[in-house]
Amino acid sequence: MGVPLRARGDSEWALDLSNLKLFTGLSVIARLIGDEILDQSRAGQVDIVVQRRVIAEITPELTELGITGISIYALDDVLRGLPSYQQQFHNQIRTVFGTLQRPRWGSILFPELFPGANKKEHENALLFPFHLHSEEEDIDYFFLVERDSTRGFVRITIERDKGSRINLKSVKAITVDDLDRRTYLQGLTRITESVYLGIQRECENYHNEYMDNARRHGHFFEQLHRVGLTECESITVRWPQEMTGYLVRGPSAEITITLKRALIVLEDKQVVERLLKGDSILMTSNGQKAWLDLSRRGRGLNLSLHQKREAANLEYYLERMPDLEAISLKHPNAFKNMRIFLIHHITGEILGTIRALENMGMSEISVLYVKYAGVVPADYLEALLSLPDNRFHFYGLQKIETHQEIEGHYILSRQYSDISRLIDLDVELDRRRHAFFEAMNYAAGHLFLREALQAREHGERILLIEDGGYLGPTLNQFCLENKTLGDALKHFGVRVTTEASAAKPNKSAQKARPARRRKRSANIDLESVVPMLYCSDADLRKPLYEWLQGLLPATVEHTRNGYNRLEAVQEKFKKLAFPAASIAVSNIKREGESREVSISILHAIESILHGLGRVFSQRRVLVLGSCGAIGRNLMEDLAAKIGAENLLGVDVVADGKRKWLETQSISKLPERELYNIDMIIGVIGISVLTEAKIEKLIIHNRRREIYFASGSTKTAEFTHLSQWLQKLQKQSKPTIQKIPVELDVTPVRDPQTRHIVGSRVRIFFNPGSDQAQFNHLKGTFRDLYLLGGLTPINFLFYGVPTETMDSILAQLLQVAAGTVTRLQEGVRLPARLLAVDHQVDPDGNLLK
């Protein structure tokens, strides 16, 4: 920058840009001149001669300095082969004009702009030795830039280094010796103006941060990649609330200059190097301050105005959970020399849990997030991706929606850890087009086995802690079916090599990065991109159960759905392969958490209804699973909202003795009641609404709108519904009970955030002339609202509050630590479900 970078502490550096002069329109004039030179070169012109008039509207600062024109001259053979390196040439011209803004060099030609500069009387030209900074053979020239003050123009001569006809000694040119330390941002004025407009818009919406990303403004991020921020894909500008008035009403020219000065420092390679090392840069300019730093492992650029931002960390989330923190401090070595494989929702409480696991001595952690819908808060990503990537690995799934799929399918998310070594998994998920649960099972198995292979290589153990039974039941079943390790690796698509040398990562694989935007990957050469893990032939032939002995001491399950799936395996084989601790039916979880889950389900549904202009009080609701822990609370809460007379329940253990209508199956509900409902909430864990029942409900229902919402972590309540809609959509002439219909699928968006909160399937009825009994349907339609995309609705917003989850997650880690400790002490825990308050206490001790 021509301004010294000064250290401020261990990780902050400062630049004072008060004397930096900012010229407008330099990229524009550089492009115009470059294109004209290129046109003359292509036309075969003998000598290159360009005379460009300076236009005040484009470059007002040059006009104010008395510059009326720019003259460029080059002999015919100096720019030979120019079309082959035209991009470099354009960059060189931008470099020349950009250099004029810096005090050290600008003062040579424009001393009146930089009164404090130490310009010597005889120095009156700048030499740009581009031949010293290019590997291109044809670039053997330099630029000589002079100012003719008398006639008001800038002269640029392009001349060969060897055989130059210019007597540089007589010219008294000063060599610009920092060309290798700068990369110019093209279109910085336009970029700054766009950022300023975004800041104003956010101020008007009462926000104090503005975010932008590469999808919306590709040009800006191309420039950031050029300066060395190759992973950067978002920028966040923050300001204190008290600065809002200034940003809205203050002089726009002054604010944009501050923003431009803050961003122009990125042209300095030394600044970029400091940012990539994790340091922050303070820019000061005439009393204004702005800080730059990187987060999310280089993917996020942060610009903080007036006040330095506080870096996100997990400690904040753990401090809000005193019970969990106390447990983690009580067992500091519970998971020593152990990797944790965690499958759970991405919530603030789970961020605190990750910090607690670190307190408990775990060596590494891999987290597969259960994320159905909604948006991951930026603060969560900031905190997670501030952690060292050699110990903390975070993954999740991204839903891909197409016109051919009602439910969509899932690939690996790009929001979390780098997935360049998991491209094979990403490709396979895209090929399989699984629904959510099946995609989670496949991804979990793949990631777990990779971690297990590495744990064995490093002499560590691995513990599976999960929410939802995505993997534990499958591992137990594979072991009890006597499958080999090789069978499991093949099933989950984990590629291994039996040659130890081949398992070492190569440099090209390490540098490979998957596209941030999703691309079809049929032609990816996985052999060259994805490094394989080592596994001996002998291990591949071993039974999976034998191979996991001493490696996987136990599994730990959080939810009732996961408990039920483990219980099904246990009933089938009369045992499990490993002890399976669970808090799913503990006293504290069944009472406290279920009550709060019910509230969060209804809150999420009500928020969507309000966005649609609807209210709960006008609904008639059917709850599937009405006698379960969550279902009982839902029925009570709904009865208070809409009245017991507008409430129906279905559960296999229903006794019909409650104040609302409740039966043991849907078929036992009176049709006059069933066909007058307009909302179905499922908390049952299985799909009982079959295709035949769905068709009758849609044809005979007296309500035009029907809302479907899931409150179970199993995502299975409406499998028949989604499959039936999928089948209809694929048919060229869809029918429902032989009635011709048409389907229209549109997303449902929150009117304030514009986030997608579900979809609406509109079914138009077109009965034929021979279907007189359905004439009343002609020209009508039925709207099916699939709230949250039929995934658990309570996780679309806030889930269960921290106050409740604190004690629940504390018990989860308490029984995990206790189970591991008991096994280390030699206690023989049986290979079966070990439910807290039923078979074991919270410390993993067997109950008598």
Image: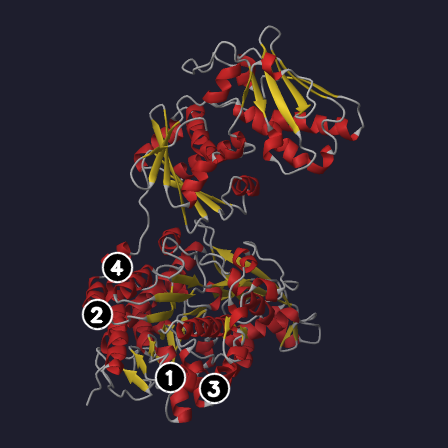
Q: Secondary structure at mark 4?
A: helix
Neighbour class for label 3 at 10 Å: few (<14), some, many (≥20)?
some
Q: Which residue is mark 1?
A: 549
Residue at 56% x, 67% y is 424
For marks 1 and 2, give the one nearer the viewer: 1
Reading the image, the residue beneath label 2 is 331
- Residue name at image x 44 percent, y 16 percent: 114
Q: Residues within 10 Å of mark 4 (few under 14, many from 20)?
A: many
Above or below 449: residue 76: above
Q: What x and y, as percent, mark residue 620?
A: 41, 69
Discs 3/4, front: 3
Secondary structure found at label 3: loop
Task: Give the distance between the C-alpha atoms of the residues marked 2 and 4, in whole angstroms.
Answer: 15 Å
Mark positioned earlier in the residue sequence (3 or 4): 4
Residue 802 lies, in percent from the top left, at: 27, 61
| Residue 331 position in % (x across, y down) | 21, 70
Give the Cα separation between the discs numbered 3 and 2: 34 Å
Among the two numbered marks 2 and 4 on one chain, the one whose residue lies closer to the N terminus: 4
Identify which residue, 457 or 659, lies in the foreground: 457
Kindly report the distance in space between the C-alpha atoms of the residues bearing marks 4 and 1. 33 Å
Q: Which of the marked residues, 1 or 3, is nearer the chain's N terminus?
A: 3
Q: Residue at x 33, y 69 (%)?
A: 638
